[in-house]
Every structure is written in C-alpha cells, then in structure tokens.
Image (cartoon, rainbow, N blue to C red):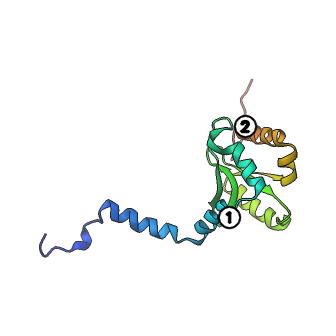
Amino acid sequence: MKGEDISKFPLPLWERVRVRGIKKMTQPIIKTAKTLRKRSTDVEMFMWRHLRAKQLKGLKFRRQQPIGSYIVDFVCFEKKVIIEVDGGQHSVETDKERDEWLKSQGFKVLRFWNNEVLTNTQGVLEVIRNNCLLPPPATGVEIRRKI
C-alpha cells in the first residue's frame, strides 16, 4: 500500500453515502418540496388523510414530490398517477404546460378544485380509485386479436 496511488481505492461506503446525501440535499427543488410539505394547505392536509398509509386500495402516495422541475401535490409512482388540488393560485396556462410535460413522462394528471375535494370527497376518491385501477394507456402499436 505504501507508495500506491490512493485515488485507485474507492471511498468507504459511509463516505460515499455522506457525499451523495450532501449533494442531493442542496438541490433547491428538494428544499422547496420540504417547505411545501410543512406548509400544506388545509385542503391538501384533508386529502392527505385519505391517501396516506396505503388507505386507497393499498397504493402508496407521496405528497409534494419533485418530478423533473415541478413539484406535484400527490403522486402514486406505481400507477403513474398525479393528483393536483387547485385553489385560486393556479394559472391555466402554466398548468397546461406542466401537465403536457408530466404526460410526456408517462403520468396521468388528475386535477380537482379545493371546493370539489371538500364538498364531494367520496366522488373525488372514486375518480382517483378508478384511474389508479385502470391499466396504463397503451403506447406504440395497438395489437388486435383475431376472433
């Protein structure tokens, strides 16, 4: 070992994890997502009570999750479904651009207004449940079976 170049030897596991962790935690979008989780709106908290802990058909949802350069309200990665709860602060143009990008990444985006979540909770959950249970949209060439 004496006289050998130390750069040939990889860092110990704990050192690699620490270095990677520091790099990831400094990304501004991660900090923003953490802040949004701490400062969720009342309606987002209400919705989270229904989605957390795999209460909806055993599906795992995450809240205020960064995807690309966007932060989505709720996402189920297993079914590639994103749920957005919109109040008055949302712009239709910005949302359209964002939705198109998320759809290009294979996600299905479901949007609900705050009052819809509060006044028709079971209906909103039913729409989410149905969209999560549907098979993902087919991509590419459609295969038809001869009968």
Does residue 36 lie above or below 127 as drawn? below
* Residue identifier under label 2: 134
Which amino acid lies under the numbered mark 1 shown in the image of this protein? Tyr
Extreme residue in the left direction: 2
Q: Where is residue 34 in the image (x, y as percent from the top left)?
A: 61, 63
Identity of the residue drawn at 83% across and 66% down:
89
The residue type indicated by label 2 comes to Leu
Image coordinates of residue 4 in percent, x first then y, are 16, 73
Give the distance between the C-alpha atoms of the residues marked 2 and 1, in whole angstroms.
25 Å
Task: Let me know if residue 84 appears in the view.
Answer: no
Q: Residue 43 versus residue 99: which sits nearer the camera?
A: 43
Q: Nearer the viewer, residue 96 or 12?
A: 12
Image quadrant holding the C terminus, namely: top right
In depth, the one of 12 and 53 nearer the eye is 53
The residue at the point 82 percent across, 64 percent down is 90
Residue 3 quadrant: bottom left
Q: Which mark is first along the chain, 1 or 2?
A: 1
- Give above or below for 139 relative to 146: below
Q: Is 64 left or right of 119, judged from the image as shown?
A: left
> Residue 32: which quarter of the image?
bottom right
Residue 134 in the figure: left or right of residue 19: right
The N terminus lies in quadrant? bottom left
Up-down: is 45 above or below 12?
above
Residue 59 position in % (x across, y down) = 64, 40
Q: Residue at x 74, y 54 (%)?
A: 44
Q: Which mark is residue 70?
A: 1
Tally of numbered tags:
2
SS class, disc 1: strand
User: Measured from the top left, where is residue 53 in percent x and y?
Assistant: 62, 42
Q: In this view, does 44 lie to the left or right of 60?
A: right
Circles 2, 1 touching at the beta carbon (< 8 Å): no
Instruction: Give the class, few, some or many, for how many residues have Cα within 10 Å of label 1's Cα (few <14, many ≥20).
Output: some
